[in-house]
Amino acid sequence: MADSPTLGSWETWMDRFFVWSAYVGLAISSAIALIGRWDEKTAGLAVLAALWTWLVLSRAGRPTELSQWALRIYLVGFFAFGMALMWQSPVFLVYGISGFYHAALLRPWWTSFVGVTAASLVVHATIIINDRRLSAWLIYGGIVAIQTAAVWIGLYGGARLTDVADERKRTVQQLEETLAENVGLHAQLVAQAREAGVFDERQRMAREIHDTIAQGLTGVITQIEAAEQSWGDESELRRHLDLAQGIARDSLEEARRSVQAIRPGPLERSRLPDAIAEVVAQWSDAEGVEVEVHTTGEPQPLHPDVEVTLLRATQEALANVAKHAGATRVGVTLSFLGRAVALDVRDDGVGFDAGRPTAEGHYGLAAMRQRVEDVKGVMEVESAPGEGTAIAITIETEGAVDE
């Protein structure tokens, strides 16, 4: 089965048809007219008509690309020769029919209508050539009008349908290009989302490692150093070693839970106020620093992410006290304020310039602030050299959910 013609080959065939329809129509008409009776005038007109088509139409190239003025000049000559030949013999209407095809190339559309009308006048001229009565003219005018309207409507409708089809092709092509672009954008977005997910997971793991393993190791080292200072005091040495062992086990368990994205152990066992109290008590025993814990307001269920953020913030604040503050007293207050929950951690330590955090404490505070901002909260740090430090965290609870 042969392949269907491409658009380019179809246009080539149409160009050939427009040219050869005039030659073929002229040849058939001439053959019929001259077989029975040779007429030099008819033969001469036929030769001139063929020469006119060759000079103006054939030599100009493709009819579909011919300039409108050249096409109009050609049709004027074509209709003149057509009418003259029809006057010689009615069979030349076969030649005149090709005028409809050429008139279809005229633009704008009103010139095409004029061309179709001229072709109809030529084709049906035999009606009035041999009969000059009014009735013949009326019949002639009626046939020309009906045929012109029918042919022109057909041409115009076909052209409109072609335009619609072309527009649909362009639309389909644009849709295909858009779909292809969307596929590329989708792939890019997926890659970016994957990279963002990897980055977020790295950030989460960095915070969890800092809040569990790093703090745990710091606590273990602190207890081991204290044990070294207690060498010779059996009971005190055992107490520090037991604390170091407990901190190591708790840190290992928390690290495992972090890797598996499980809630911290204290929150699994207790509600938030009790979990904070548990963490504070363990820290106070390990560091030997007095801590006062208060809960104000009516406790309410919070989103798990909010509870984890507040618990980790408490742990980080206490870890900073142990590493930097040299405090003798610490206060931790958890406040349920209806539409918000607040956490305040205060110490009477050495303090620091809050506008210029030390390099050692910078990451812990930055990680804490990032956690708070991730749950749409606000964190403020107030401190000055020799005046202790206060960390205040406030988180809206509009989106609080039941546990």
Image (spheres, rainbow, N blue to C red):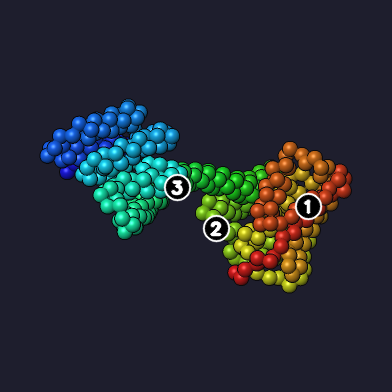
Marks 2 and 3, how far apart in space?
Answer: 79 Å
* Residue designated by label 1: 380
Q: Quadrant of residue 139?
A: bottom left
* Residue designated by label 2: 262
Q: Position of residue 72 (x, y in %)?
A: 40, 37
Q: Which mark is residue 110?
A: 3
- Above or below for 166 versus 257: above
Q: Position of residue 385 (x, y in %)?
A: 86, 43
Q: Earlier in the sequence, mark 2 or mark 1?
A: 2
The residue closer to the viewer here, 238 or 380, is 380
- Above or below for 314 versus 232: below
Q: Residues within 10 Å of mark 1 (few under 14, many from 20)?
A: few
Tell me the mark number nearer the camera, choosing from 2 and 1. Answer: 1
Q: Position of residue 369 (x, y in %)?
A: 71, 50
Question: Residue visible at 73% across and 67% down?
Answer: 339
Q: Which mark is residue 116?
A: none
- The amino acid marked with disc number 1 is Glu
Q: Is residue 103 left or right of residue 380?
A: left
Question: Residue visible at 74% across and 70% down?
Answer: 338
The residue closer to the viewer here, 117 or 318, is 117
